[in-house]
Image (cartoon, rainbow, N blue to C red):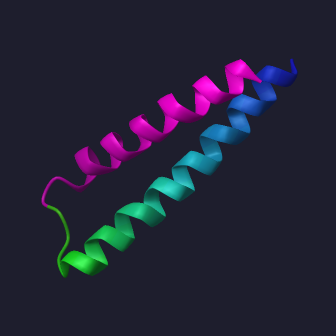
Amino acid sequence: MLELVAFTIAGLVLYFISDWILNQIEIRRGTRFENRSLVFFVIIMVLALVLFELIKRI
């Protein structure tokens, strides 16, 4: 049960962190990506794989 709560909280945190990272990249780039949702997906997927692996090991 505790693992389920940890994964849910991690998912929410990942969403907001990924959005922030994407916005920072676009600010530095000076323009928005055409395929913004695809870039967001890649960012959140990489972060999720790393974070969920860390949660499983703990």
Q: Residue at x 26, y 49 (%)?
A: 39
Q: Main secondary structure of the magenta part?
A: helix
Quarter of the figure with residue 54:
top right
Quarter of the figure with residue 25:
bottom left
- 56 or 9: nearer the viewer: 56
User: Can residue 7 be found in the magenta stretch?
Assistant: no
Q: Residue at x 66, y 39 (%)?
A: 10
Q: Quadrant of the N terminus?
A: top right
Quarter of the figure with residue 27:
bottom left
Answer with left or right where residue 32 lies relative to residue 18: left
Q: Residue at x 20, y 76 (%)?
A: 29
Q: Which residues are magenta?
A: 34-58
- Name the outermost residue toward the right: 2
Q: Residue at x 24, y 56 (%)?
A: 36
56 shown above or below 46:
above
Pinpoint residue 5: horizontal percent, then vertical percent. Answer: 80, 30
44 shown above or below 36:
above
